[in-house]
């Protein structure tokens, strides 16, 4: 099993930046695709970004494309989400997740989730 802990959330002004981190423990995540999701109040959880097991491929929701960047540092067992040009509609709880099927180039079945980190953007 993999335990995930998100951090780096907080408050930012519109147009500002934040970097979220997702630290994993329990096993190395170097063989697994990882992803970020978010859930705004009163809305369903939605996909934000994903990264392949080796970092060679990344995927983004249209709403964040060009503003957010997902990356990973397998030596630190950590995945990041750099968020630039933040908008009020980016306000949500952000979660990371792992696909425990090995060597996937895209995120499939998510098996483990973190507890989330709150991002608030003021206009």
Image (tube, rainbow, N blue to C red):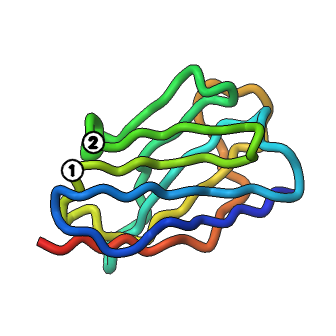
Left or right: residue 105 versus residue 77 is left
For the point 50% across and 66% down, the residue is 8
**Residue at (67, 66) in percent of width and height:** 5
Q: Which residue is mark 2?
A: 67
Q: Decide: marks 2, 1 in contact (CB < 8 A)?
A: yes
> Residue 25 falls in which quadrant of the image?
bottom right
Q: Quadrant of residue 9?
A: bottom left
Q: Where residue 42 is drawn, which disc sits there?
A: none
- For the C terminus, give its image quadrant: bottom left
Please give the residue where the numbered disc 1 appears in the rendered image.
Answer: 85
* Residue 10: x %, y % from top left: 39, 74
Quarter of the figure with residue 120: bottom left
First in sequence, mark 2 or 1: give its number.
Answer: 2
Numbered disc 2: secondary structure: loop
- The vertical placement of 41 against 79, above or below, is below
Q: Is residue 56 above or below residue 116?
A: above
Q: Is residue 46 shown left or right of residue 29?
A: left
Is residue 25 shown left or right of residue 85?
right
């Amino acid at each position: 099993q993999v335990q995930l802990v998100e951090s780096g959330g907080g408050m930012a002004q519109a147009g500002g930046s934040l970097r979220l981190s997702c630290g994993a423990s329990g096993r190395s995540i170097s063989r697994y695709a990882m992803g970020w999701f978010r859930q705004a109040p009163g809305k369903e959880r939605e996909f934000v970004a994903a990264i392949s097991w080796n970092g060679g491929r990344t995927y983004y929701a249209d709403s964040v494309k060009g503003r957010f960047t997902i990356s990973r540092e397998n030596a630190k067992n950590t995945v990041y989400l750099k968020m630039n040009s933040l908008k009020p509609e980016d306000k949500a709880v952000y979660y990371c997740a792992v696909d425990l099927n090995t060597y996937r180039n895209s995120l499939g079945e998510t098996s483990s989730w973190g507890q989330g980190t709150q991002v608030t953007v003021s206009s």
